[in-house]
Amino acid sequence: MRFHHKKHGKFWAYTPWDFFPALSGVLNFAFVICFYLAFAQWHFPWWALVCMGFTYSVSIGWNINSVCHNFVHNPFFTSNLLNRLFSLMQSFALGFSQVCYDAVHSRHHRGNSDKPGDDGDTIDWASIYRHGEDHEAESVWTYTFFSYVRDDPWAILRELRTRSASEARWGAAEIIGFMALYIGMFFVNWKFMLFFIPFYYFGHCLSYLNGYYLHYGADPDQPIAWGVSSYHKLYNWIWFNNGYHAEHHFRPKMHWTKMKEFQKQIAADQEAAGVRVITPPHALGFLDRSLPEKSRSVLAERAIKIAKQLETQQA
């Protein structure tokens, strides 16, 4: 992860507001430690451990799309050492290299969830069209549950080498670091790890679910409409303005604190370009009423039907 950037302060690289996502990352890491202690030392009841497990799953999807996402675009600290340590901590908490995530995410912004080209592949490895048919987005369910096992660490490391040998070494170090930690934990307490792994996997699935609706219905051919936005207030407050995704793809280096004001400035152009906006948070995008019927699940259809009935009764 390249941390050389213009410094705007003595401690915070851009703004003191980054204290909040930075603190959130630390608390997420602390929660993982507490999760282990609750299982191995404090002997919480099974129902409490299951609740902690699902909380950890949700925290993965939230962290990747809020803390991690903002960090790779605008590293929080002026100190390269602090940025490296934060990156390593995140790698341990989430179980994947943040440097490698930066490489994959850079390709995501080069391709912007593009459709396959003449070679049958996409520039963006995370494109919702990469494994679809007839240049259509693949099913949300296969994208959600299969994307994690599709990652190619060797291709990612080769991508890092195109930046620099040191970046590839840092990426490899983080991969080895978190894998050594997780494998070591099997020797320390294999029962906890067998309990932990399903929640870990499900958390990454939730991240991909969120990612799917960040681009489903976007226009890969119009820069201003490369992403799908959600202006749900609580969602953007908790996820550090991740909902402003069309705006983010239009100006990837813009800091998360400036997204709301930027959206106001380009609102007319967005409307003219037909930028897609959904009502719910992206992770619940399958509940949006504007989705084509074929892309909705049976449960989503039922939920939308109930919501409409309630509105009719209230009217």
Image: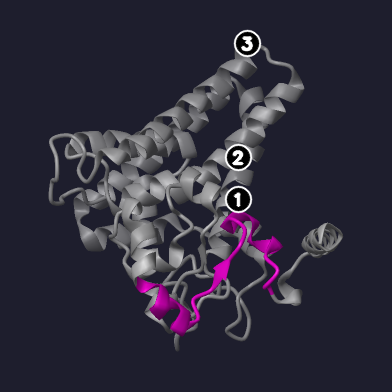
Q: Tell me the magenta residue range.
A: 266-291
Q: Residue furthest front?
A: 315
Label 2 packing within 10 angstroms: few (<14), some (14-19), many (20+): many
Task: Tell me, for residue 57, which label it has, or none.
Answer: 2
Q: CA distance from mark 3 to mark 1?
A: 28 Å
Badge 1 element: helix
**Residue 40 in picture, x, y percent from top left:** 61, 15
Is the C-beta separation of discs 2 and 1 under 8 Å?
Answer: yes
Q: Earlier in the sequence, mark 2 or mark 1?
A: 2
Q: Residue at x 22, y 46 (%)?
A: 14
Q: Secondary structure at mark 2?
A: helix
* Snapshot quadrant of residue 180: top left
Q: Position of residue 229 (x, y in %)?
A: 50, 65
Residue displayed at 52% across by 64% down: 214
Q: Amino acid at mark 2?
A: Ser
Mark number, residue 206: 1
Determine if residue 297 is in view.
yes
What amino acid type is highlighted by mark number 3?
Trp
Instruction: Decide which of 247, 33 is in the foreground and name it.
Output: 247
Residue 118 pos. (x, y %):
45, 89
Residue hosting label 3: 42
SS for callout 3: loop
Vertical relation: 18 (above or below) 231: above
Neighbourhood count class around disc 3 (C-alpha, 10 Å): few under 14, some 14–19, many 20 upward: few
